[in-house]
Amino acid sequence: MKRSKKYPIEIYNRILELKEELPQRSAPLVHSILKSEFPTSCPSLSTIRKFIRDQGLTYKPNPSNQHIIVLKYNNTGTRLWGGI
């Protein structure tokens, strides 16, 4: 992080707390919370996004929650059934 010293360390610690508290919390929501808590020195949305990404705290849904469609074909290429 090239410019991390521009803002107080408390702000970056708060970003970490907010993301660890609720990993699904988006950068815009973190930004709005920070604006209310630190009105005079709140980082920009892009700075928050970059910090979250650099810390590896981006939210990735669990692959088991995604539906996978399995198609079975017979030897003639006709679909027999599809399942989840």
Image (tube, rainbow, N blue to C red):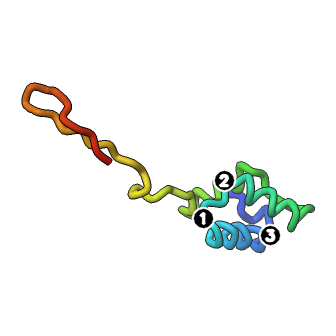
**Amino acid at circle 3:** Pro
Determine the residue positioned at 70% across, 56% down: 48
Vertical placement of 80 versus 12: above or below?
above
Mark 1 or 2, closer to the camera: 1
Disc 1 to disc 3, how far (Cα)? 23 Å
Write down the quadrant of residue 73 in the picture.
top left
Disc 1 to disc 2, how far (Cα)? 13 Å
N-terminal of the two: label 2 or label 3? Answer: 3
Image location (x, y in percent) of residue 3: 72, 58
Determine the residue positioned at 85% across, 60% down: 35
Q: Which residue is mark 3?
A: 8
Q: Residues within 10 Å of mark 1 (few under 14, many from 20)?
A: some
Q: Nearer the viewer, residue 59 or 56?
A: 59
Vertical placement of 69 versus 11: above or below?
above
Say which quadrant the N terminus sits in: bottom right
- Where disc 1 sits, the SS reads loop
Numbered circle sitting on residue 23: 1
**Amino acid at circle 1:** Pro
Image location (x, y in percent) of residue 16: 66, 70
Image location (x, y in percent) of residue 55: 57, 64
Q: Which residue is mark 2?
A: 49
Q: Nearer the viewer, residue 73 or 59?
A: 73
Q: Residues within 10 Å of mark 3 (few under 14, many from 20)?
A: few
- Where disc 3 sits, the SS reads loop
Vertical placement of 28 versus 56: above or below?
above
**Amino acid at circle 2:** Arg
Q: Residue furthest right?
A: 40
